[in-house]
Image (cartoon, helix red, strand yellow):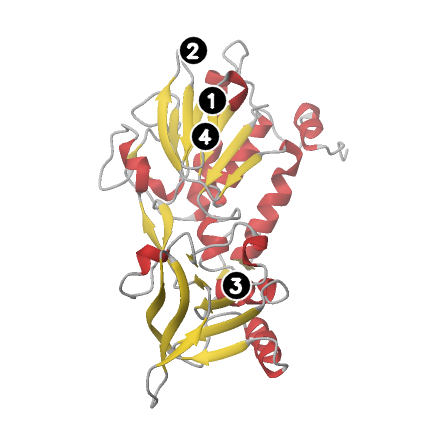
Amino acid sequence: MTAQDVINTDVVIIGAGPSGLFAVFELGLGDMKCHLIDILDRPGGQCAELYPEKPIYDIPAIPMCTGAELVERLMEQIKPFNPTFHLGQMAESIEKTAEGNWRVSTDRGTVIDAKVVVIAAGGGSFVPKKPPIKGIESYEGKSVFYSVRKIEQFRDKNLVIAGGGDSALDWTFSLQPVAKKVTLVHRRDEFRAAPDSVSKMRALVAAGKVELKIANITSIHGADGNMSGIDLKEDGKEHHEHSCDTMLAFYGLTMKLGPVANFGIGMHDNMIPVDTGSFESSIPTIFAIGDINTYPGKMKLILSGFHEAALMAKKAFTYVHADRRYRFQYTTSSSDLQNRLGVSDAH
């Protein structure tokens, strides 16, 4: 690896959920640049993936917003600081460099050097729940997939999308114009997706643009990782084969701590103990905020993660800008902070 292959920044944040996103804001106020790594294909963590339409009532000054709206507002708030996202990637290893920085490497070959690492990984990484189909592993990555990284990968495919939630329906809409044929398969004729999405899907079915099968997938046919079809079992009917060459399965996600457990940080019950004055772990310059950390009185609330991000950024400043004195300022009155935010003084 050459020096040109390594990305240099001030702070690497592992996890792009609400705590990780707000950390960008607090670090940005301290003139610290951030890169974020997340295994999901978009920012937002659980809010974006598990409950985008679910109301949240305990965000200060916002009586109610959905998970998706909260993420949208956080993304808008951090725009002035131009963070860089490395999505669809898992932080696989972390090691000290000769210069004393941290080198974080992902499973897709991204390598980032930084003075500070912030672990905001929630309960860990999201991993897809796999359909209970014997031998499915031999098709994974070749004709069976659990996420979409490139839409073009599905062009002109005879595609089955399995699942009944928002992800399954959203990708049905996105891939229907691209694929040769799209068949949506769900075990029952009730869907967990937003009502508007369900209506839109049924309209496509009625127009003959999408085929809907209410059935269980019992087996896959094919060879050498290339599928030729699936067996379906509909209520009251015999098993029958459905021809297809590609399948996207959206059966939900489960939490897995993943490589974070192997970073050499002292952990307790799969969580990282921290100092409550700075939310620094037992290893200097490595911090943990949000649901991944533990301390006396810890409450797993988004609000707590925001508070932890603010105190973390204060301590991180002393590492990133060791030659500068930390000066506490208010955004309401500091022209310096307002310049960083790109706003003018209202007074």
Quarter holding residue 118: top left
Q: Which mark is residue 99?
A: 2
Q: Residues within 10 Å of mark 2 (few under 14, many from 20)?
A: few
**Left or right of 85: which side holds 223?**
left
Amino acid type, callout 2: Glu
Q: Nearer the viewer, mark 2 or mark 3?
A: 2
The correct choice, above or below, for 265 with respect to 169 in the image is: above
Q: Residue furthest bottom?
A: 236
Q: Residue tagged by mark 1?
A: 113
Q: Name the N-terminal-most of marks 1 and 3.
A: 3
Q: Badges 2 and 1: C-beta atoms under 8 Å apart?
A: yes
Q: Residue tagged by mark 3?
A: 53
Name the residue nearer the viewer: 296 or 126.
126
Q: Badges 4 and 1: C-beta atoms under 8 Å apart?
A: no
Q: Nearer the viewer, mark 4 or mark 1?
A: 1
Amino acid type, callout 1: Asp
Amino acid type, callout 3: Glu
Q: Nearer the viewer, mark 4 or mark 2?
A: 2
The alpha-carbon separation of the residues under discs 1 and 3 comes to 36 Å
Q: Name the N-terminal-most of marks 3 and 4.
A: 3
**Residue visible at 64% across and 65% down in the picture:** 177
The alpha-carbon separation of the residues under discs 3 and 4 comes to 30 Å
Q: Nearer the viewer, mark 3 or mark 4?
A: 3
Quarter holding residue 346: top right
